[in-house]
Image (cartoon, grey):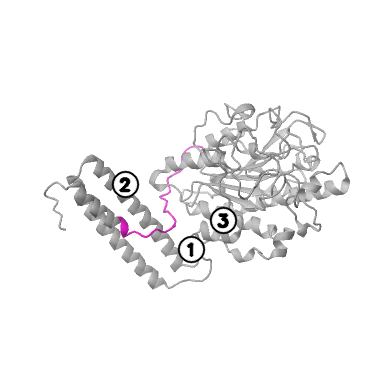
Amino acid sequence: MKLSVRKRMHRRDFVQLIGGAAAALPFLELFEHEARAQITGKKSRYVVFIYTNDGVNNPQFWPTSADPTSSPTLKSLAPYKDKVLVLGPKLSGTAPMADTGLTYNTKPAQHRANVCITGSKVGLPLNADQVHAVNKIDGPSLDWTLGQALAKQDGTNKALFDNICLGIHPVGGDTPSEISFDGAGNPLTRYTGAADVTAKIFGGMTAGGPVNAAGAAADLRKQTAISDFLNARFGALKTELSPFDRDVVDRHLTSLRTYEDRKARILSMQSNPNAACKPPASAMVPTDDNSVRTGADTQFLAPFFMQTLVTAFNCNITRVGTVSFGYHGGGGEGGLRMPWLGFNDAQHSVSHHGGGAEKLRKYGLMNAWTISQVKFLMDQLAAVPIPTGGTLLDQTTIYFFNRHGDGNGHTNFALPNMILGGTGGYFKTGQVLALPKTSPTEPLISIANAMGVDLPTFGSGAYVATNPLAGITA
């Protein structure tokens, strides 16, 4: 069939042509190129939510001076003390005062963690099926909400994934362990292992040696030739089409450009083993049954996940990441184990310390190790310069949060939550707050605002908030 642009095209002809063009495109999961825009004003570009469970050893966690890294648990963050904002309670000595700090207006049922980044009512049953059941709640989590909003803001330069959820031993306990939910309240997919991440986030690429550079370049030339031909053909046809069909063509050409950008990025990485966008080495993470059973893999999986998010930010794979450490609740194996610290106790067990010195010692060590992984993430972000000046850390907000204040009493006040990172200059970091009773949903609205997302209200029921947390913006 020969089509002439000198006469109006019939819809049948157009459909046949566009269908043939679409068939020329392979279905590949590739990285999208980002034309980095100049960051203006005080706005964070990236956000990481880090969840840990079972509360903290309060006397060791809370700073008692103006230095937000002066406590035994937080001392590893000292190099970044000007980038740490502790959302603290009022203290009596080293102990939090009841009903101060971030406090749930209505105490959630024991072990429930879902309110941490949803601000939503939780009605999940004990002993629910965490692998096959859909443990639905009544609203989305903030990571999903931000991912959707940022994708709309970024348009054709949007990241490949709206958000990425990573879970370190996330399943177990006596209550469902999901913390991230979509708009319908369904739990989001979590990646729980290095192989999962390499295959599903990085498209099966390896971090090994170079491939045939000449072959990659030839593939790129072929792909570009196809795209150039289709762009020229569709461009010539547009003037002969109805407004509806022109819109179809425009959207199709946008898809072509996105595909070409992704293809160019992955071919470049394949031909250059030193490219910054290659995935972190998964070989560092042990996967043998003994390491997984004892929790020894966590020591390597946690930094692998942190490196994954840094690469994802740098390569426009996502702007929103979530990492959960273990699962909340008792039963089963009792959550995370950290044998490299010199003991095999489960975190849930030591959190029920009963005031015993030995359990409190172990509790503090486990809390401090988790904080060291936050510091590792900050190190990795600080090592990546960005074209607009500064580093990824300067443009990233990290929210560290916990379901309980103290695991022994399942307390719902003095939640040990912090905002960290450069935050694009949005937050007034480098300080310790002594908050009165404050809704944990308020900081979530503040974080949304820091990302340039207007969120006038968030949450539901007793957990709803309609204002950001006052007094924390720069």
Q: Which residue is mark 3?
A: 308
On screen, 388 above or below 291? Answer: above
On the question of residue 245 being in view, the answer is yes
Of 457 and 369, nearer the camera is 457
Query: Considering the image in quadrants, where does the C terminus appear?
Result: top right
On screen, 290 above or below 48? Answer: below
How many circles with numbers are drawn on the protein? Answer: 3
The kind of secondary structure element at disc 2 is helix
Of 295 and 401, nearer the camera is 295
- Identify residue type, mark 1: Ala
Q: Residue at x 24, y 53 (%)?
A: 16
Badge number at residue 251 = 2
Front of the two marks 1 and 3: 3
- Identify residue type, mark 3: Thr
- Identify residue type, mark 2: Arg
Task: Decide which of tag 2 and tag 1 comes sooner along the chain.
Answer: 2
* Gap in angstroms between the C-alphas marked 3 and 2: 31 Å
Q: Which residue is mark 1?
A: 275
Q: Residues within 10 Å of mark 2 (few under 14, many from 20)?
A: few
Q: Residues within 10 Å of mark 1 (few under 14, many from 20)?
A: some
Task: Decide which of tag 1 and tag 3 comes sooner along the chain.
Answer: 1
**Residue 111 picture quarter:** top right
Does the magenta run of residues contain 288? no
372 sits to left or right of 258: right
Task: Give how far across and how far down residue 143 sits, in percent.
Answer: 55, 42
Task: Give how far across and how far down residue 102 sits, in percent.
Answer: 69, 32
The kind of secondary structure element at disc 3 is helix
**Residue 306 picture quarter:** bottom right
